[in-house]
Amino acid sequence: MLQAIQDSKSARRYLKKYNDMCLSAESLPTANALDNAESDEAKTYKRLASAILRLANRSWWENAPKSDEFDNIINFARMCKNNGIEISILSSPFEEESIEGKLEWCRAHLEPLCIFSRFHIRRDKDTFASSSSMLLDDRAKVCSNFKGNGHSVLFDSLWEANALSVINNNDITHMYIDLDGVLVNTHKHIMQIMKSL
């Protein structure tokens, strides 16, 4: 991974700016915050984080750490499944390596739980939106796009109460859960790479 960053001209340029600005991995904003990056610092974090995600190999994705909320999300998903809601993963890919790595992560951590119907690694999340579907995602802009035809819940401190409200007030038959930033602590994983650069 570190060699891939050194071999990438654009990644080296972002890393140089990151170092020149004396930025710190501990101050890396969340993906949701980076979507609205306006300051030079935020834009630099966003570009370096994007380069890391683009250059990450299959093993990096496969070995990503679970999020702190993993067990709570799984318990919620199990409850939903027991109430007749189909549960699937819906996560965006980066490069080709991320698709296989994410699928391997799902096979290792989720398949044995027998909760999830499918593992979708696709860019077109909003095409899964319908009046009977709900998406749990950590990015407001993705949630907003999904809400065009479906229901979405932003993964924040109120996610569980908000998800229950959507389910109780709508005929939800399918719940989609994102990986990055929800079941997977991608933020921590990126910070680990930044610290080693």
Image (tube, rainbow, N blue to C red):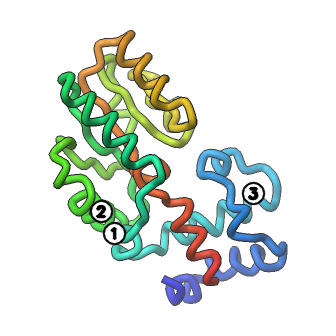
The residue at 73%/65% (across/down) is: 44
Residue at the far top: name it: 169
Q: Position of residue 183 (x, y in %)?
A: 40, 50
Q: Position of residue 177 (x, y in %)?
A: 36, 40
Q: Are marks 2 and 1 in contact (CB under 8 Å)?
A: yes
Q: Amino acid at mark 3?
A: Ala
Q: Is residue 20 above or below residue 160?
A: below
How far apart marks 1 and 3 lie (CA) works out to 27 Å
The residue at 68%/69% (across/down) is: 25
Q: Is residue 25 above or below residue 15?
A: above
- Closer to us: 55 or 181: 181
Q: Position of residue 193 (x, y in %)?
A: 57, 76
Q: Amino acid at mark 1?
A: Glu
Q: Which residue is mark 2?
A: 105
- Res. 129 in view: yes
Q: Which residue is mark 3?
A: 42
How far apart marks 3 and 2 lie (CA) works out to 29 Å
Q: Which residue is mark 1?
A: 62
Image quadrant in which the C terminus is located: bottom right
Q: Which mark is residue 83?
A: none
The residue at 21%/60% (across/down) is: 107
Question: Nearer the N terminus, badge 3 or badge 2?
Answer: 3
- Res. 10 in view: no
Circle 1 SS class: helix
- Asked whether, in this view, residue 112 is left or right of residue 39, the answer is left
The residue at 39%/41% (across/down) is: 72
